[in-house]
Image (cartoon, grey):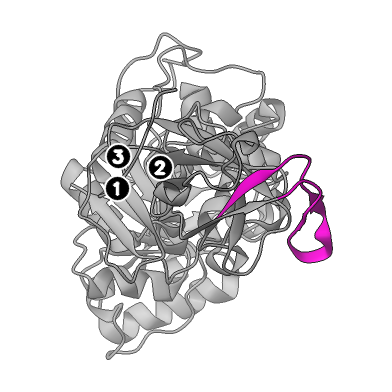
Amino acid sequence: MVQLRGPFTVSPPVRVEAPMASDSSWLEVDLTRLEKNFLALRALAQGPSGGSADQENKVKPAAVCCVIKKDAYGLGAPAVAHRLVKAGCDMLAVYSVKEAEHLINKSVNCPILLLSPLRELGRTDALYRPAVAETLHLSIHDLDQLQTVNQIAQTFGFKMPVHLYLDTGMSRSGLNAEQFTVVLQNLKKTPHVRIAGIYTHLATADDNPDFAYEQLEQLRNTIEQQKDNVPDDCLIHIANSFATLRDQRFHLDMVRPGLALYGYGTELLAPGPILKDAPVLEHTTRWVTRVNHVQRYPRWTPVGYGSTHKLKRNSVIGVIPIGYGDGYPLALGGKATVRVFLDDRGSHFDAPVLGRVNMDQLSIDLTDAPGNPSPEEGDNQDIRWLINAPVHIYSDDPAAPNSVPNLAKLAQSHPYEVLCRLSMHLPRKYTH
């Protein structure tokens, strides 16, 4: 039998600084992969495609607005933003004022599109300077907000760049077609706003492209009816990650990838058109911890709250110090695996999660770890070598059973949620 033993030093492969001794778990975010994903998506948006492109309507390369709302999907917005700006992104999009302020306070120098409706702004606010510099772009959701924004810009003596949000079927916010028409026909009444963009949000680009095409057509038709009131330099945009990957007809003047930047999206597309040169995205993130306890237990021993799992054999159970308090989904209890590394060369095996997810602990089955004595060899065989073994809770290997998309599917959830629910107290460690 091949003996795979510690001691363990850092999680393989070595890509980031060693964790602090006090860190029970941490995220490792590969910014090099993030940049590769961005460059691949930008190339897709800018170049002619052999997919289902509509070259008649594709007259110029599309700009790229990188969506980094909710702290860059939980991965740390400032670090992600700085890398994307350095790589050449044209604009960043966030949802809330607080998210925009966070970027400004971290010296992110790039136009920012605020997706939520802003209705007040003071001279001492963090967003005042980018607003006056006209690098803060606001979304207009209703007529009252437009009047308010016009008054703000008049007070401070500048023209506020705004993007009109046209609702074409999401039914979540934004202007309906009638309100949209009123806005464009009455621009002389709001001289302190500048129409910098018009956009809508696709509801089904991942799983129902037919409805997405209906939304695209509605956007085009509504704008066409008011084309005399639409500035020539106005950015028309509709494409989220899925639409960017699916069809160049969605690209228009700007694309807004979010999830795809972080390496996820292609595997989630339901049947339908997909650009033949759509890139293979690289997963950017893994969640890492270490085994902090091991123990032998006899057959039929119950495991965890509710005794929902009973051992079917003499077993070696390990404990890793993470749980739902850190953002691990309760739905993965008794279903998922974690990847346990057995030496610094990267040898590993996938250990089942046993029983319910605890607030700050998971029980995992280490019985079949290569190099582990079989249960039949008795309790005298040493299992302490498994202490401190590195564990990938979320793997950055797309083929791993514990990759983010695979775990999301197992939890009947979505990579959006699996990433965004990660606790803010988890250290984020970056590969540059």
User: Are discs 2 and 3 less than 8 Å apart at CB?
Assistant: no
Q: Earlier in the sequence, mark 2 or mark 1?
A: 1
Q: Label 1, on which residue?
A: 8
Q: Which residues are magenta?
A: 298-318
Tell me which amino acid carries mark 3: Pro
> Percent x, y for residue 29?
32, 49
Nearer to us in this view, 256 or 363: 363
On-image quarter of the N terminus? top left
> Percent x, y for residue 401?
57, 33
**Who's the residue at 51% across and 13% down the image?**
52
Mark 3 closeness class: few <14, some 14–19, many ≥20 residues within 10 Å = some
Q: Label 2, on which residue?
A: 262
> Percent x, y for residue 312?
79, 40
Does residue 283 sit above or below 8 in this rendering?
Answer: above
Tell me which amino acid carries mark 2: Tyr
The part of the image, by quadrant, that contains residue 50 is: top left
Indicate which disc residue 116 carries: none
Tell me which amino acid carries mark 1: Phe
Q: Label 3, on which residue?
A: 12
Please name which of the two marks, 1 or 3, marks the residue nearer to the observer: 1
Q: Secondary structure at mark 3?
A: loop
Please name which of the two marks, 2 or 1, marks the residue nearer to the observer: 1
User: Are discs 1 and 3 less than 8 Å apart at CB?
Assistant: no
Relative side of 33 to 357, left or right: left
Count all numbered tags in the image, as a single digit. 3
> Percent x, y for residue 57?
44, 22
* Gap in angstroms between the C-alphas marked 2 and 1: 29 Å
